[in-house]
Amino acid sequence: MITDIDINDLKRITELIHTRHGYDFRNYAMSSFKRRILRILELKNLTIESLIKRLSESPSFINEFLDELTVNVTEMFRDPGFWRALRDEIIPDILLNHKTFNIWHAGCSSGEEVLSMAILLREMGIHNQVSLFATDLDITILEKAKAISYPVKNMEINEKNYIRYEGKWSLRDYYKEENGKVIFDKGLLANVTFRRHDLVLGEVFNKFDLILCRNVMIYFNQALQNEVLKKFHASLFKYGYLAIGSKESLIWCDVANRFLVVNNEEKVYKKIKD
Amino acid sequence: MSRFSLNNSYKAVVIGGSAGSFQGITKILAQLPKTFPLPIIMCLHRLKHVRNGFVEALSIKSVFPVVEPHDKEQIKKGGVYLAPSNYHMSVELGNYFAMSTEEMVNNSRPAIDITLSTAAYVYREKLIGILLSGANRDGGLGMKHIKDRGGLTVVQEPTECMIDTMPRAALSLTKIDYVLKTDEIVSLMNELDKLYR
């Protein structure tokens, strides 16, 4: 088993993916990127050289590669306090000025967060007033997100989070169980548009009242975080909200002074300047 | 005459612990010299979904305030850092932290192996690794990486541990430099401090 990878080999891989496949991982945080590559080598039983060969010679391998490279570990209602803040403070504030509004889940992974939002909006009775956009780099995971079906074993933590969130009903009311999987009510996705989008190389494509990008930018280095935060700033209406992960911060970035900290514990910011 | 073979070129101390380590870690933090010259980076197993309380509890008696760093936060002298709940915490080249929500490692997130191994990669022989009481094997491999990169390795004396699985895992994987009781770890930290005066 390979236990470490030379930095120069990592660079060869990121350069190859960039020139040949048009994805830019050159500014990813080094330690987690290295672990992901090590994980792929182990899962697919490859060496560095055979990985590079497959990336250069097999066009379809890139999707499989991206699906393993990106971290798709997530939970419904992760950080229940954040979801309570959305329900009790942030969304009521948006509703003061807008009867209808847009939300962008940037880096939606397998869809747990979008689903949480859909449930939150339904319980607030405003699901018909909100358009949700869910994007990810990884087309394989987008298909999983659209299916809103998860292994039963994942539900323990989701249920616990929902209870801590103090939802109106029981999470069980939203899904049925079949062959070791749960399948959520498809109606929850009625106002959700899924789309492949690359945060690193992609353009600003719409304007939003609320953007959620939680625990996605942690895989980027600071220079790349800075660039992506500029795109989020440009993608928000004035007085729109940006939510990032509980251990992320934007105090050091270029657009910091165009945001106001609304909730420091849950890392919710409000755009106050264009 | 010192019983420890130390020098003043270390850049950081990294500490791992799990079940039964709270008392030991509290004692070490409470008896740190006020001039302690190195950052202390801690990865302790903790309840995944309880974000608050732990860092406060550790801070009560600690000489330095204990903080849960943000992603990409610089590592500073005098800083005492604790891996936040439900994130893995890595040390990056350039001397800063990076968080991740990757799969659990050894059934743990944060995983001690990740913090110890990434610190070993960055600090090489300029790292001191300390592994305390714990009920699983997480941290054993990280201690081996520290040793392999030339760092100094210390585990808590198994007979003093509430649960000795964790230090024993390290002892079985690599040659550990010092097997010490908590009080002796405190002495080591004090001797280290003197070398930097």
Image (cartoon, grey):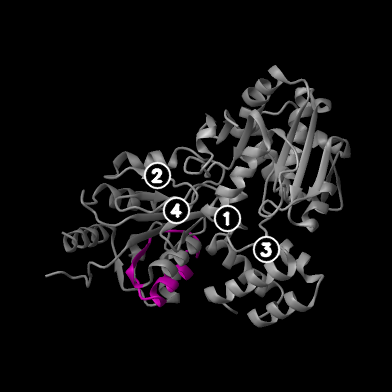
Q: Is residue A228 at least partly visible in the picture?
A: yes
**Image quarter (top left, top right, bottom left or bottom right) of the N terminus of chain A:** bottom right
Which one is closest to the eye, mark 4 or mark 2? 2
Mark 3 on the same chain as mark 2: no
The local secondary structure at tag 1 comes to: loop
Query: Residue A273 appears in which quarter of the rendering?
Result: top right
Compute the Cα span from label 4 to label 1.
25 Å
Query: Which secondary structure lies at badge 2?
Result: strand
Residue count near mark 1 (Cα–Cα under 10 Å), binned few <14, some 14–19, many ≥20: many
As helix, strand or loop, the secondary structure at mark 4 comes to strand
Which residue: 64% across, 70% down?
A15
Rounded to the nearest whole Å, what is the CA distance between mark 2 and mark 1? 22 Å
Query: Which quadrant is the C terminus of chain A positioned in?
Result: top right
Q: Which three-letter amino acid code belongs to the residue tagged 1? A: Phe
Q: How far apart are marks 4 and 2 (CA)?
A: 13 Å
Which chain letter goes with mark 3?
A: A
Which residue is labeled 3 in the image? A69
The amino acid pointed to by label 2 is Val
Instruction: Work out whether mark 4 precedes mark 2 in sequence or the reverse, and give the earlier one.
Output: 4
Magenta stretch in the rendered image:
B125-151
Q: In this view, does A228 lie above or below B92?
A: above
- Asked whether A218 falls inside the magenta stretch, the response is no
Q: Name the residue under label 2.
A: B67
At label 2, counting other C-alpha atoms closer than 10 Å, the crowd grade (few under 14, some 14-19, many 20 or more) is some
Inspect the image, locate mark 4, and give the three-letter code of the amino acid beneath it: Leu
Towards the viewer: A150 or A109:
A109
Q: Residue tagged by mark 4?
A: B44
Q: For the residue carrying disc 4, how many other residues have a C-alpha within 10 Å: few (<14), some (14-19), or many (20+)?
A: many
**Which residue shows up at 72% across the image and 47% down it?**
A108
Is residue A159 shown left or right of residue A229?
right
Mark 3: few/some/many CA within 10 Å (<14, 14-19, 20+): some
Mark 1 — residue? Answer: A220
